[in-house]
Amino acid sequence: MSAQIVKLTASLAESERRRVVEQESMSETIQQIKEQVMNLARRPTTSTPDDTHDESDEDDYVELTP
């Protein structure tokens, strides 16, 4: 019985250690994502180029084939 308790206690400690490591990893990942989002938010937006050519816009679309 005592050996079982020791084994279960060790298993529980290992499980807790893994949980802490995973939590730390997730926290790092979340922090990196937050930084990336903030960097994207700071970037100036780029406008799309004007479509000023004189051709019709028909060539901009693909027609469905029967």
Image: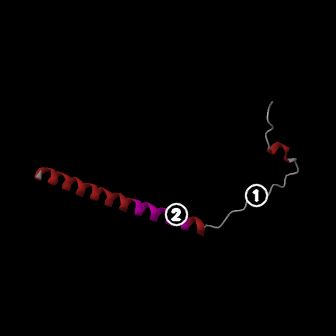
Nearer the observer: mark 1 or 2; the answer is 2
Say which residue appears at 19% left-offset and 56% top-offset.
Answer: 9
Mark 1 crowdedness (10 Å alpha carbons): few <14, some 14-19, many ≥20: few
> What amino acid does circle 1 point to?
Pro
Q: Does residue 37 appear to the left or right of 3 in the view shown?
A: right
Q: Which residues are magenta?
A: 26-38
Say which residue appears at 85% left-offset and 44% top-offset.
Answer: 58
Helix, strand, or loop for circle 1? loop
Give whichever of 31, 16 is nearer the camera: 16
User: Badge 2 is on which residue?
Assistant: 36
Give whichever of discs 1 and 2 has the lower sequence position: 2
Q: Does residue 54 appear to the left or right of 44 in the view shown?
A: right
Say which residue appears at 23% left-offset and 58% top-offset.
Answer: 13
Q: How many numbered discs? A: 2
- Residue 17 locus on image (x, y percent): 27, 58
- Residue 15 locus on image (x, y percent): 28, 55
Tell me, for residue 49, which label it has, or none.
1
Q: Examine the rendered structure and indicate whether residue 48 appears above or below residue 55.
A: below
> What amino acid does circle 2 point to?
Gln
Say which residue appears at 45% left-offset and 65% top-offset.
Answer: 31
State how far apart marks 1 and 2 are (Cα). Answer: 26 Å
